[in-house]
Amino acid sequence: MENVKSLNFSMLCDFYELTMGNGYLASGMKDRITYFDLFFRTVPDGGGFAIAAGLDQVIEYIKNLHFAPEDIDYLRGRDLFTEDFLSYLENFRFTGDIWAVPEGTPVFPREPILTVRAPAIQAQLLETYLLCTVNHQSLIATKASRICRAADGRAVLEFGSRRAQGSDAAILGARAAYIGGCAGTACTLSDQLFGVPAGGTMAHAWVQMFDTELDAFRAYCRTYPQNATLLVDTYNTLQSGIPNAIRAFDEILKPLGITKCGIRLDSGDLAWLSRKAREMLDDAGWTECSITCSNALDEYIIKDLIRQGACIDCFGVGERLITARSEPVFGGVYKLTAVEREDGSIQPKIKISENLEKITNPHFKKIYRFFANDTGKALADYLCVYDERVDDSKPLTIFDPDATWKEKTLTDFTAKEIMVPIFQGGELVYDRPTLPEIKAYCAEQLDTLWDEVRRFENPHHYYVDLSQRLWNIKNDLLRDRKR
């Protein structure tokens, strides 16, 4: 990441973060230690899990977080903030602690993806950017995972830059899609900045620029003989496109001894056309010629194409991936869960709502994930108070918090904490993995989930239970608030 230009996004915050910060200072709470959890409430597209992403951008943000003189001048011009608060911002530096699940981890509703422990003003100022980047990248990584799983081992390329909602969405969306399983992207800048493999061949304009389709294909094969993928549907796929591609391959590639090449279909009945294309290519001796298809694809269309016997080796997916068009909001939130008293003890805090799903899990917490020793599969997640320990040498009965009559007793399992320290005392303590390492970790972790949890329709409800101690704390707070 050292080659990526770091930007200061200190002013990318909701205005009330600043007004609250000013108020905390005026109220003598500047140094009050607080705990905030970043979590989400529902999985997009009715899925069984989400994929956490965006942590590396959070790290870059915090490392470079400061208020420049022009920021202070702007805030002073609003005539809302005290000089003491502006002076505080002039010397601002994050001094807190952060824990998070590593990028690529499958995560579930209402469990922390990231926890911040910091003085009140600092913790509050982080909210907007942390939500912005984690919500966006987790959304795209989750969608990419669904699409790549639908492709059943076939490569998926992210093609969505031109339909993304802004340049940042295109660049970071390609990064998140790679984490989620995509093989590469059409976004050159994502390759330059993050190493997401970028690739591409031609658009219809290339074919139209030449007097004939065959001339266009010949020219491309001459220019890129080792990477010749020809777009065959500019005019007529079966009558001219594929025959002209075969002729260009025969004339240009065959004398060079090159047998690997490709065609791309971007319109029409992709299942039928791909089957016909495969037949024509094989009959001509181009059995190693791959077939790529694009055109408003998503996980459901891809599954249908495969079910219909489509002969497709690679899918190019654009707008429905980069915008997560079917459900384009992740819905992560950032909520206060505890504060420290003057004696250093931790006082849990809870948010109560008439909407049950908006009631928060209080206290400074950690997450255990339980894995079956015989299969290696994830059995459940377990939220507990920060100083609790799970003894996985003994049977443990867990409950479904959404249906407390549902329980199961776990035996022969291993308990692993899934949140790791990222910042301690404002200093980065996390050994940041490379993007390929994150992608590989994501694939490895997906393999720990049962197929029933990974299915698209009516996925199995994965248990995320609270320890008895945390359950008691939560219910005590709920009872206290009723008085």
Image (tube, rainbow, N blue to C red):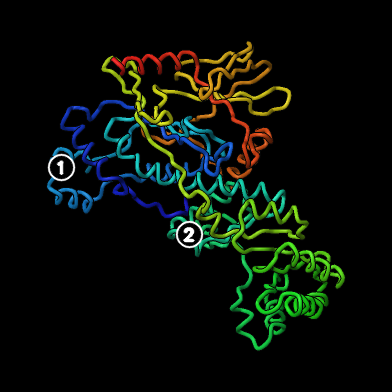
Q: Mark 2 points at which residue?
A: 164
Q: Residue 116 carries which label?
A: none
On the image, the x and y values in percent for residue 343 come to 28, 14
Q: In this view, does 481 lie above or below 295?
A: above
| Residue at position x 73%, y 77% in the image | 241
**Relative side of 27 to 396, left or right:** left
Q: In this view, does 73 lie above or below 452?
A: below
| Amino acid residing under circle 2 | Ala
| Amino acid residing under circle 1 | Phe
Query: Mark 2 falls on what kind of element?
Result: loop
For the residue pair 303 and 18, the one nearer the viewer reads as: 303
**Relative side of 251 to 81, left or right:** right
Q: Residue 81 carries which label?
A: 1
Residue 469 is at least partly visible in this image: yes
| Residue at position x 46%, y 31% in the image | 112
For the residue pair 465 and 459, the one nearer the viewer reads as: 459
Tell me, yes or no, whether the two marked residues, 2 and 1, touch with CB atoms within 8 Å: no
Q: Nearer the viewer, mark 2 or mark 1?
A: 2
- Res 396 → quadrant: top right
Check the image and name the residue furthest to the bottom.
211
Q: Earlier in the sequence, mark 2 or mark 1?
A: 1
The quarter of the rendered structure image containing the C terminus is top left
Query: Mark 1 falls on what kind of element?
Result: loop
- Res 362 → quadrant: top left
Q: Is residue 154 above or below residue 17?
A: below
How many other residues sit within 10 Å of disc 2, few (<14), some (14-19) or many (≥20)? Answer: many
On the image, the x and y values in percent for residue 252 come to 77, 79
How many other residues sit within 10 Å of disc 1, few (<14), some (14-19) or many (≥20)? Answer: some
On the image, the x and y values in percent for residue 137 come to 49, 47
